Amino acid sequence: MPEAPDLIIHKMNGQWIGSYTGSSEGWIVINIDERRTYYQGVAYLTEHDKKVPSAAAYFRTKDKNPRFNFRTARILPVNPFTGIPDNWDRIKSHYAPEMTISEYADVSGNCDRDTLSLTWTTSLHTVGNCVLPHSKGGEASDLVPLNKEWDTYKSYISSLEGRRYLFRGQTHPWRLRSSFHRAGRADLTRFLEEDIQALHKHLSARTKHVFNLEIPNENGAFFNLVQHHGYPTPLLDWSYSPYVAAFFAYRGIASEKATQADPTDKVRILVFDQMQWRSDWNQLVMLATAGLHVSIGEFLAIENERMIPQQAASTITNVDDIESYIRSKESDGKTYLWAIDLPVRDPDKVVQELRFMGITAGSLFPGLDGACEELKERNFEI
């Protein structure tokens, strides 16, 4: 028997983006994590009027009721030059002398299947409201792919300018999304303050190198290390090699599965014009920022041998729906991102050719795991 409408619990976790109105107007991004008995997160309010400081409001709900009210925790102004929440004393000189910021806001609202509705009143008696759609990150991809066979794929990629593009192989045509957001998380402030600190504490006893997270290159290398060992992060792995991407697209597809595959079953390779993207948009290696971004990083291969044979690069982002964000930046005939779909039924042919090129699990994953995976592919082909 279906639940009565009033008893259906609509989860708040995820990323919600839209506009707000009230005493002022602007753009709002809300990142919410689900905890055991409540939700917590941060709302970034970016003012249209640059004479008014933007703000980051941190909060937690009393429980998981889809109808809620609460008072925010701290509210911090956003530094107009870095986009990062900052101390008011450090940035107030950039605003009129009479300008100040709220200490808190009283918030009430409701969450249903597709929208998050909020109203608020601040300690300065300013008011605001918004109705926000949920991110489409968990939905099917909207990209219309180029459908290729293996031979036509090789011809196609041979025409592309070397090192201009990044490639990413996926065993399904999923929407482009980081493992962090796929895991249902969105609050990157929590990720930095809790997850990364706990990982650093535990892994420092197991790595020869103790990472200094205050140094950007080492911080990025640490993120990449935990990503490559299975911890969900806001990074996405890419390769400068379209053949390495093909390896990951077909990785783990057994011959029996391929034989039984429908002709419409596809693996996907994403192509990202990283050179044009870097030229057109600022690249930030920061996460807890008010502004949304997708940035490209090439981190040091500290304790992470596999980065070199994989010809690896990464995107780092605070965006749940990466695909929509990148597509929203395309104008004047520019295309930054597109997809190539290949038939699932071709793994034997593809894997054999990749072996001739030296692209195997053993070469891409130096160590026992990679060697065993490669030998498993050879000896258990059926």
Image (cartoon, grey):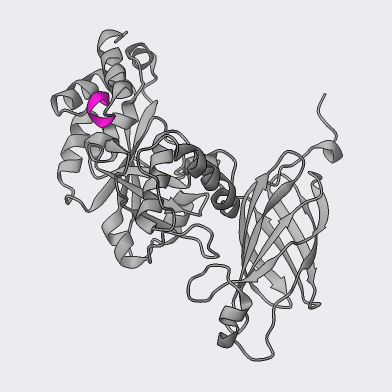
Q: Quadrant of residue 20?
A: bottom right
Check the picture and name the quadrant holding the N terminus. top right
**Residue 48 falls in which quadrant of the image?**
bottom right
- Look at the image and say whether residue 336 sits in the magenta stretch: no
What x and y, as percent, mark residue 306? Answer: 28, 35
- Residue located at (25% from left, 18% from top): 348
- Quarter of the image for residue 128 reads bottom right
As drawn, 338 above or below 341: below
Q: x%, y% of residue 313?
A: 31, 47
Q: Residue furthest bottom?
A: 97
Q: Position of residue 339 (x, y in %)?
A: 34, 42
Of 61 and 355, nearer the camera is: 61
Residue nearest the viewer, comparing 354 with 112: 354
Residue at horizontal 24%, vertical 42%? 311
- Specify whether residue 139 is in view: no
Left or right: 357 as drawn, with respect to 287: left
Q: Quadrant of the C terminus?
A: top left
Dominant SS type (magenta): helix
Left/right placement of residue 262 relative to residue 371 reads right
Is 362 magenta? The answer is yes
Does any portion of residue 319 appear in the rendered image?
yes
Position above or below: 326 against 227 = below
The location of residue 230, given as percent across then percent down, is: 45, 33
Question: As rendered, which of 33 and 171 lies closer to the eye?
Answer: 33
Lateral position of residue 306 relative to residue 317, left or right? left
Magenta stretch, residue numbers: 360-365
Residue at horizontal 33 percent and vertical 66 percent from the top: 280
Q: What count of labels does the image hold? A: 0
